Image (cartoon, rainbow, N blue to C red):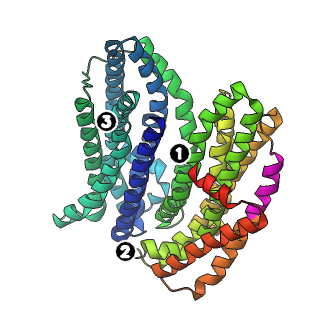
Amino acid sequence: MLLRSIATVGGFTLASRFVGFLRDLLFAAILGAGPIADAFVVAFRLPNLFRALSAEGAFSAAFVPIYSRLLVDGRVVAQRFAEDTLAVMVAILTVAVIAGEWAMPWIMRGLAPGFADQPAQMALVIDLGRITFPYLLLISLTAFQGAVLNAHGRFAAMAAAPILLNLTLLGFPPALLYFGIDDPHAFAWAVIAGGVFQFLFLAFVCHREGIHLRLPRPSFGPNVRRLFRRMGPGVIGAGVTQLNLVVGTILATLIADGAVSYLYYADRLSQLPLGVVGTAVGTALLPLLSSELKTDPAKALASHNRAIEAALLLALPAAAGLAALSEPIVVALFQRGAFGPAEARATAEAVAVYSLGLPAFVLVKALTPGFLAREDTATPVKLGMIAIVVNLVLNLVLMRPLGHVGIALGTSAAAWINVALLWGTLARRGDFALDARARRTMPRLVLVSAAMGLVVWAAEPYAPKGTLGLVVLIPLGGLLFAGLAQLTGAAGLADLRRAFRR
């Protein structure tokens, strides 16, 4: 049952990422990477910021355990808790949306200060922000319904819901353009349509499963208060990552037209391996460590070492490949329509720099379970806040000489500092240390990945141009890495198969 649930969620998540990537290809072709694209990215960043802070991960992690425990006492008690939660959410989010619509001019002046000297662009981002902001209410209610379904053991619907948003963003803009709505507004209205479709889809599934929730008068009962208390650490934890993104967006608006978009496209590319590798390792490691720490601490330490090895076994070659082939990848994927050669070069520069931080982003996800498994949720958040300050300082220092590339470089450097803080804290407490096998294999993985990246980079000028060249170079890099890893003892074929399977 557990494996089937994991496979269901993983399959739909992979499908969602693929459709989302097609969405980004359409976005690049129609809007390109300039003032209009920058305005849309900033406008869509706002509801996504609040969604990530409150609605999805933090809410589900706090709601599902309470609701599941109440189900044991009886469905009526659990349903009353769910209805009270729904009523409070609707009340709070409705007020938040109304306040956000009214305050949008001031919000956007804070989120996009670089647009202040361009009245037309500022007016556009305010208009787009007002259109997209109600998405916060829709996606929060969708996340609520998904959490209820997950507690009942129904995982597929919530995992599939993001596909509807991405399909809407693929299909609606061309249709709306046909009716005379301009490009950025077509995408903004598509966001709202996607939110409606997700909400209605989850409502239908809840109804089919016999889950019928009323909307009573808001009431902060003891269980609802417990829910919000438990959400606190999750909201703060999500805020660390989201604030780094917001800091980068704010500063990018001060650089030049297109900088926000360059960083957006580059981040989307780097998120592909991060989402697959980092999330998989962190998700699989936490319950394993939690169990083994109670029964066999030595085994837990070995598991943590193997998890970090597996993370680097996948992240290091991915980072080397992205760095070596950043421009061919961006050209093949994005360069069409309004996204020209200049935009491709600028985005590729950011991709190459983000790739330097990719192993660090993955290691953060592999090290954090070392704290969470010991029921320490505060330390990773505190260390993450230090990383935010470092990120801000580095971005301010580097953006002046390097532009948007400086922001990407500051973000990557701050991620490595976060790794050093997490690793050092675990080591100082005696909760983590590299064993003999990890000390032997990790330096070899670094060398093998660097060698693979250099060979692929040197071979790129001689490969066919365009997509065909990537079809040749990417398998070449993969085979070269596997061969060198086997030859040097960095990883055998059995290790490679085990890492991908895990």
Tag 3 secondary structure = helix
Q: Earlier in the sequence, mark 3 or mark 1?
A: 3
In x, y percent, where is residue 429? Answer: 80, 32
Q: Amino acid at mark 2?
A: Ala
Q: Is residue 497 magenta?
A: no
- Return the residue at label 2: 338
State whether residue 158 is above or below residue 335: above
Which residue corresponds to the image point at 44% horizontal and 59% vertical from the top-left?
Answer: 115
Q: Which residues are magenta?
A: 434-446
Q: CA distance from mark 2 to mark 1?
A: 28 Å
Q: Earlier in the sequence, mark 2 or mark 1?
A: 1
Are there few (<14), some (14-19), or many (20+) residues within 10 Å of tag 1?
Answer: some
- Return the residue at label 1: 242
Nearer to the camera, 19 or 181: 19
Q: Is residue 439 magenta?
A: yes
Which numbered circle lies on residue 468?
A: none
- Return the residue at label 3: 98
Which residue corresponds to the image point at 64% horizontal and 29% vertical from the top-left?
Answer: 291
Q: Is residue 158 left or right of residue 321?
A: left
Nearer to the camera, 7 or 21: 7
State whether residue 404 is above or below residue 209: below
